[in-house]
Amino acid sequence: MESKTLSPFVYWAQTEKEITLKIDLRNVKSPDIDVQDHVIYFNAVGVGNQGQNTYGFQLDLMYAVDPEATIEKVTPRNVELRLTKQDPKFWPRLLHENLKPAWLKIDFDKWMHEEDLQDEARDILEDFPGLYNKMKASETGSVLKPESLKKVYLFLYNLWLFVGFLYIVVVLLMRYASFGAESLEGSYKAVGWMMHLCFLTQFLEILHPIVGYTKGSPFEAIMQVCGRGVVFFCLIEAEPRMQTKPVVFFLFFVWSIIEVVRYPFYMLRVYNMELGLLTWLRYSLWIPLYPVGFMCEGIVILR
């Protein structure tokens, strides 16, 4: 029975003018390579994904290349081909048929091109984002990089806490506007459940610098989150008599106002955006509010 020819892994990339093929075969001595306008034939003996064997493939190209300008490079690690396009432009795919064999991969590390009048290499993602993302999705099944997923997570994390603390501020103000000083005693009953959820979520901020999602030391997050957590969980939530004290209203309000400014600031920073007023509030509002918060926390502790 005639054995089926094995195919090596082939990694391809392109610039506006060239196609690069990296054939993952080691210890190749004399490869049989035939480059035509629209077809590439390859056959060689080497060490590939199936060990020492004879490997070969045929590529029917989407557009024409110049066979005379082909550059072949055989190294102990692989075989490289540089093909010059007859019509300089970016190809949406390598093959004529819209079917990609499993052994043909995209070499994303080489997806760069150089402007004729510039020395600095530019990323194709900046100039052809739709083309790159389409091919990335075809190759990996997703266009989201781990870095992008991290940004999405941080944005949603900060958005959730912004909404949570904004809810607390709005409810406290609406109750005070409707019932005046009588609303102070019911502050915990009205928003305590939301404060509980927000504080539980904030404990993730201890993990963020540990796993590299944010900069800074986890000890800073421990000091802030655990300090407030002790006051809330141990001195307010665990003590029903404290829950009806007016100081709870002022403490919840101060905590929430600070966070209503802090988390939108972090949301914008995830995507390197900035609002002047928000930045000013982020670094100024805490100056009068932190002493008020410390005073309220002290009252809770002493009672």
Image: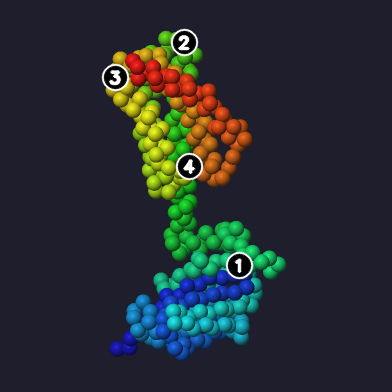
| Residue 74 position in % (x across, y down) | 49, 83
Quadrant, the C terminus: top left
At label 3, which amino acid type do we have? Answer: Glu
* Residue marked by disc 2: 180
Q: Residues within 10 Å of mark 1 (few under 14, many from 20)?
A: some
Instruction: Specify whether residue 212 is in view.
Output: yes
Mark 3 or mark 4: whose residue is earlier in sequence: 4
Give the distance between the C-alpha atoms of the residues marked 4 and 2, in whole angstroms: 36 Å
Dot 4 or dot 2: first in sequence order is: 4
Q: Disc 3 designates what residue?
A: 239
The answer for how far apart the CA atoms under marks 1 and 3 are is 66 Å
Q: Amino acid at mark 1?
A: His
Query: Which percent across, then down, holds residue 67?
Result: 59, 84
Residue under the point 32% across and 22% down = 235
Q: CA distance from mark 3 to mark 4?
A: 35 Å
Distance CA(mark 2)–CA(mark 3): 25 Å
In the rendered image, which quarter is residue 242 located in?
Answer: top left
The location of residue 31, given as percent across then percent down, is: 46, 87
The residue pinned by badge 4 equals: 155
Q: Which residue is mark 1?
A: 113
Q: How is the image coloured?
A: rainbow
Q: In the image, 294: left or right of 236? A: right
